[in-house]
Amino acid sequence: MSMTNLSPRNRLVVVFVLATALLSTVGGLDTANYQQFFPALQQLQVSITSLQAQPDNQSLNGVVTFAIKNPTSYTGLGLQSFAVNFTTVSSNGTSIPEGSILFSPRVNPLNPGSTVRYTLQFVGSGAGPRQVTQLLKDGRTISYVFALLLFPTTFLDRVISLTIAYLCISSGNAAACQQQGVIIITSGTGGPTRGN
């Protein structure tokens, strides 16, 4: 049976049925993607792929590379910026706060299965580099502790802001970072919501 054999009213019904089926399919795919949103936030993977430091009395002369991966099938995540606070910790337990790094790359999509890498330099602050240099001269081992805050961009940017916190510990080797939580701040009257 062809459309030409149908009455105008039945043709209109067939067009509406086809349009409804098409829109339902598109809506279903978007809904399935949306349901992956919060699991995708929890499953983002951050790691240190390399870390090198050659401390002297003025600087830690460090370079660290972070890798951020979306292992899920969710599309729609991007990264607008991240902030890093870091501390050096020696094998005798001495902890030396070294400062912060704020990095705002151009917005990069975090596509399903893809990994983006960022290489940052870190120098330390105050007397920190001198203390680290002395600890190394005394035969101590130094670990670098990075508290990393990701600020992703999503379809919800107008109503919420998201921050994902990670803790990374490395002594110069590659290291996996542990997610500490997802902080959601709505633009309404409610306060922040924290998920884990």
Image (tube, rainbow, N blue to C red):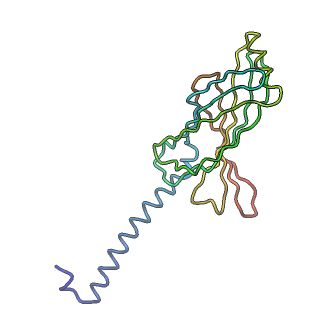
In the picture, measured across the screen, residue 12 lies left or right of residue 101, that is: left
**Farthest top residue?**
139
Quadrant the N terminus occupies: bottom left
How many numbered badges does the structure rendering display? 0
The picture quadrant where one finds residue 158 is: bottom right
Residue 142, given in percent of the width and then of the height, sits at 71, 19
At 57% from the left and 33% from the top, the residue drawn is 47
Q: Answer with left or right where residue 186 lies relative to residue 78.
A: right
Q: Position of residue 102 (x, y in %)?
A: 70, 43
Residue 194: x and y in percent read 69, 48
- Image quadrant in which the C terminus is located: top right
Give me the residue at 29% from left, 79% from top: 14
Question: Is residue 159 rendered to the left or right of residue 70?
Answer: right
Figure quadrant of residue 150: top right
Q: Nearer the viewer, residue 13 or 179?
A: 179
In the rendered image of this protein, does residue 158 appear above or below residue 112? below
Q: Is residue 154 above or below residue 118?
A: below
Give the residue drawn at x 77%, y 34%. Answer: 99
Query: In the current view of this chain or complex, which residue is farthest to the right?
Result: 127
Q: Is residue 22 left or right of residue 183?
A: left
Q: Nearer the viewer, residue 78 or 70?
A: 78
- Residue at 80% x, 20% y is 131
Residue 136 image position (x, y, % from top left): 73, 14
- Above-or-below relation of 2 to 88: below
